[in-house]
Image (cartoon, rainbow, N blue to C red):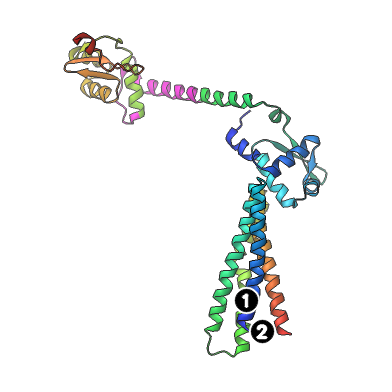
Amino acid sequence: MNIDNVKLFKCLGDKSRLSILSNLINEPMYVELLAERLNLTPSTVSFHLKKMEEVGLVHSKKEQYYMIYEIDEQLLNMSLSDFIHQENSEEKMQREREEKYRSKVISSFFQYGKLKSIPVQRKKARIVYEEILKAFEPNRKYTEREVNIIIADYHDDFCTIRRDMISENLLEREGNIYWVKDNNSNDKNPLQYYLL
Amino acid sequence: MKTIEQITKEYLEFSAEQADKCKKQIQLLEQEDKNDEANLEKVKLNIYGIFDTLIKTSEKKALNQKELEEQQKVSSFCADFLATFDRIPANWRINYEKAKEHNNVIEYVIEENKLSVSEQLKNQFNLIWEVSLL
């Protein structure tokens, strides 16, 4: 079920709509009857029903001359934790979408293990550099020559890529020494250990 | 026969009375957490404001017509103001019809509200004018 939770809860934050729902929980009804029961104009009731229909709280079906409205039982039987869980599923879907995009960029820019061209878009370039970064060992120091050799395996323009990987915070350098930046750690400079 | 100023005053009193009712209703609805209905009332309140401005414009325009007799000025003023009840809501009517055609309930309820206020004000103005002719 694809629900916009924020929209749904905003829709529920109206007393008239709650009264309409409360009536519809008992039995499906048409606009005029709801209007009479709630002392609202039929237009106002239609207005509220449309808003609830948009978030999936109610559904309508035509019966003879009337449009009958009924609640969505499945949605109304959901618990708050179901909604929160659903929100987490959305995050998961977002991650999956990102992963799919990443794979697409990698397959577009790499061929037989070589980088075809350096992407112009920063987002794509970052993905490509992260892929190249896999060739580096974490917690190991590299000389500039070693870094160039590793990158040259992917692309001839190793200077640009090396500099970009520094500016993208993927590699760090001090003097002629390079290492993979540990983005999960506060330890910025492993060389400090050696200097101690 | 009433003067332009008298007709305007009577009309504005009626409009202010209706606007006051609207304001009270908005307050009540907001207290009851019926925000969408309060917003619909706010739409109505705006319409009272629009026609208040328009009647003052028609009044000013008619009073500036120095070449006309008093009675002609009144007739010109009333005709001019009544014409605004056709001119201004014309687009609201079009929007209403379109919304209805596409079953856009939210839109057509808003347009319906605007049209009902303009209709109410038109009827009231006609009433004030008719009585002034007696």
Q: CA distance from mark 2 to mark 1?
A: 11 Å
In the image, farthest residue toward the right: A64
Asked which secondary structure carries label 1, the reply is: helix
Task: Locate residue A81, reporting x and y percent.
Answer: 62, 24
Whether pointer 2 and pointer 1 mark residues with C-beta atoms closer than 8 Å, the reply is no
Vertical arrangement, residue A22 with respect to residue B115, above or below: above
- Is the N terminus of chain B in the top left, top right, bottom left or bottom right quadrant? bottom right
Which of the labelled discs sits on residue A178, or is there none?
Answer: none
* Chain on which label 2 sits: B
Q: Which image quadrant for residue A173?
A: top left
Question: Is residue A148 found inside the magenta-colored segment of the image?
Answer: no
* Chain on which label 1 sits: B
Q: Which image quadrant for residue A6?
A: top right
Residue closer to the observer: B6 or A82: B6
Tag 1: residue type?
Lys
Q: Which image quadrant for residue B88?
A: bottom right
Magenta part of the protein: which range? A94-122
Vertical arrangement, residue A81 with respect to residue A45, above or below: above
- Residue at the spot x=71%, y=84% of the render? B133
Tag 2: residue type?
Lys
Other residues around mark 2 within 10 Å, as few (<14) / some (14–19) / many (≥20): some
Other residues around mark 1 within 10 Å, as few (<14) / some (14–19) / many (≥20): some
In the image, farthest residue toward the left: A175
Vertical arrangement, residue B124 with respect to residue A41, above or below: below
Task: Locate residue A20, reporting x and y percent.
Answer: 74, 42
Residue closer to the observer: B107 or A139: A139
- Is the C terminus of chain B in the top left, top right, bottom left or bottom right quadrant? bottom right
Which of the labelled discs sits on residue B2, or is there none?
Answer: 2
Question: Is residue A97 found inside the magenta-colored segment of the image?
Answer: yes
Q: How many marks?
A: 2
* Residue marked by disc 1: B9
